[in-house]
Amino acid sequence: MQITFPHMGNVHIPIKSLLHRLQLDVVPPPPITQNTLALGIKNSPEFACLPMKINVGNFIEGLEKGADTIIMAGGWGPCRFGYYAQVERDILQDLGYRFNMIILEAPDSNVGELFNQVKALGVNVTFWEVLKTVKFIWNQINAIDRMEKAYEYHMAHTDEKEKATNILAMGLENIGGSICQRDVNKVCHETIAGLKNLPRHNKPVLKIGLVGEVYTILEPACNFDIIRFLGNMNVEIKRSIYLSDWVNDHLFKGWLKKSNRGHIYQQASPYLNYWVGGHGRETVGCTVDFARGNFDGVIQIGPLTCMPEIVAQSVLQ
């Protein structure tokens, strides 16, 4: 079994670690390029979401590298993300590719259900081995988030922009090669320390909240690397969602860590008090939260025709 998967920010790091620790062969898709996007656009419906088109491009490139199995997350509700896997499977089969697709649905707060999904990969591991692996991957994801948050802050406060970017890139590369919790902690600590030690300037710094659809927030190839772009302009960014938030809330129904959704929904309730799918409600709530936190502004990003973000945009206007 040769497994490939879609890119979304730095999710490839924990996915590769997860599959390797479960003794599975991994065929990571190449980094997203214009060719990836061109393949997705060519073979997807015109009005499909941009993330789905990039997924299709990822899968084609992964299959061409020899993969025979695709792992994809599932979903539910008004957001079209819940249909991605089925549509992508049909597109790829129509193109002549032969493969297995394993869709990881949220385990509905049931650990046993997660175990059954892992067993579907053909992995001969015990229940406790799965839990041990999930714990390591979760710690790895949280370390990635801590490093990225440190980068978003220190990038705006130093003139050594390229060095800051290189420190983060090296940290991400090293954390991908970590084999134990001690390695994860060491890499995370050294990366954050390296960013903290960069000389600070005394120039004005704007503080901007980044809200919107999760894929376009997390994937630099989809948002024109907006965090680095704004950091070069001395703009400090805080995102409404990070990888650990998405994994915790979407795949594990909030049992890996305490979710801040209740607080965000409370902030959104005077303006949007029901679920519209995706992260539409979170976009409104986080915008209010950022405004009350004395941020200088908010940027909303999302794919063209994204219904939840269109609803949120209408509320914000």
Image (cartoon, rainbow, N blue to C red):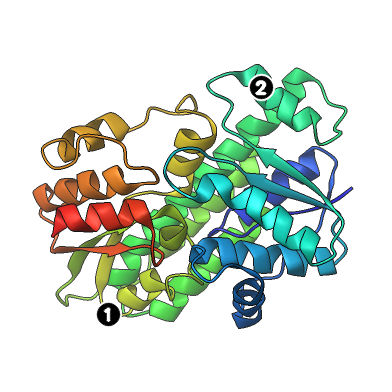
Q: In the image, 206: left or right of 27?
A: left
Looking at marks 2 and 1 on the same chain, the residue that comes earlier in the sequence is marked by 2
Q: Disc 1 designates what residue?
A: 233
Foreground residue among 72 and 237: 72
Labelled disc at residue 113? 2
Give the residue type at disc 2. Glu
Q: Residue at x 31, y 75 (%)?
A: 230
Q: Residue at x 15, y 48 (%)?
A: 288
Query: Which is closer to the viewer, label 2 or label 1?
Result: 2
Q: Where does the C terminus fall, quadrant-wise?
A: bottom left
Which quadrant of the structure image shows residue 62?
A: bottom right
Is residue 19 among what the camera can see? yes
Q: Position of residue 92 (x, y in %)?
A: 75, 61
Q: Pinpoint residue 212: horizontal percent, then vertical percent.
A: 33, 56
User: Secondary structure beneath disc 1?
Assistant: loop
Q: Is residue 28 visible?
A: no
Which element type, helix, strand or loop, lies under badge 2? helix
Query: What is the three-letter code of the residue carrying label 1?
Result: Met
- Packing grade of label 2 (10 A; few <14, some 14-19, many >=20) is some
CA distance for labels 2 and 1: 46 Å
Q: How many marks?
A: 2
Find residue 181 and report its horizontal and vertical position in percent. 63, 38
